[in-house]
Image (spheres, rainbow, N blue to C red):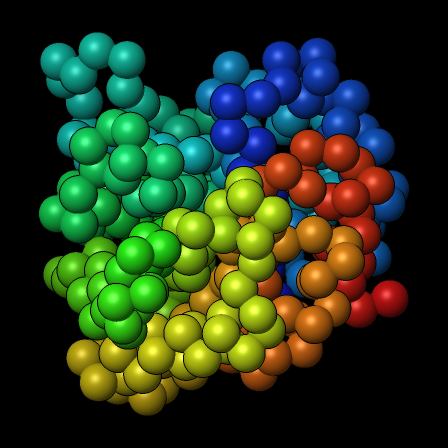
Amino acid sequence: MRRPIIAGNWKMNKTPAEAAALVKELVPAVQNANCDVVVCVPAVCFSAVLEAAKGSNIRLGAQNMHFAKNGAFTGELSADMLSASGVTYVIIGHSERRQYFGETDKTVNLRTRAAVAAGITPIVCVGELKDERESGYTNAIVEYQTRMALTGLTQEEIKNVVIAYEPVWAIGTGLTATDEQANETIGVIRKAIEQSWGKEVADAVRIQYGGSMNPANVKGLMSQPEIDGGLIGGASLKAPDFTAVVMFDR
Ligand code: PGA
């Protein structure tokens, strides 16, 4: 049995004070969650979130990191810096980073490997564009992105990676993949992992759905056998909404 994992992706939202206030509301509300709970926050909020979440079941995540150990990369953060700041999860290859910041399957792979090497759990995002789905390329795209992202990792390392299947057309649009579409494509991703790294690895990897997941649709999505959790954007910014998603089984 894979333990579900629900992660909030705050994107470029919240000051440290706002972050602390949100997490303080979440702490008692999600303390009995039957899933892993993560908030991926702007780096300037790391210490405020860590302080507010102290002693709770809420884990700290980042939204990106560089793959180099250190060096002349103005504005970037390394895996070691994240780790030393209490970060235990990091989103890698979110579609907004692929779209606006030149992230490629190659750099997604480098970042994934650097996170794993530093002991940080990567949440690797894959997903097709609207026209790719309409042209029938969804499976080919997610299979390729997944295999590229995981290349060079050992089977044991891959077991601990989290994949987020996020159809790009469903992010921030209010459009959600149907429960069946999400389940089917996540099944395709799992099959690709099985073909490349074996069934034991594929059965262990947790694969989230992301894209307009919210209190109204979480139950249907989470009742699908392949879906192991969610990566939540908009609905992670308000405590009642994120709580309702995290406590989906109540
Ligand atoms: P959304 O974002 O829930 O606002 O669609 C999800 C994501 O981008 O991870």
Task: Give the number of marks.
Answer: 0
Residue 130 located left or right of residue 56: left
Against 146, is 8 above or below?
above
Relative to 130, does residue 59 appear above or below in the rendering? above
Residue at the outermost bottom position:
199
- 151 sits left or right of 184 in the view: left
- Left or right of residue 195, residue 130 in this image: right
Task: Work out whether 77 lies above or below 225.
Answer: above
Task: Report x, y in % for residue 239.
Answer: 79, 36
- Residue 213: image quadrant is bottom right
Please state which of residues 7 and 120 is positioned toward the viewer in this rendering: 7
Q: Specify the quadrant that holds the C terminus.
A: bottom right
How far across and down, in percent of the image, does residue 22 sit? 76, 27
Res 114 → quadrant: top left
Q: Residue at x 35, y 43 (%)?
A: 95
Left or right of residue 100: residue 86:
right
Q: Can see residue 79?
A: no
Q: Which quadrant would residue 225 be assigned to in this image?
A: bottom right
Residue at 56%, 53% (x, y): give it: 175
> Visible in this render: residue 212?
yes
- Which of 237/177 is in front? 177
Where is residue 12? Give x, y as percent.
51, 22
Q: Position of residue 31 (x, y in %)?
A: 81, 50
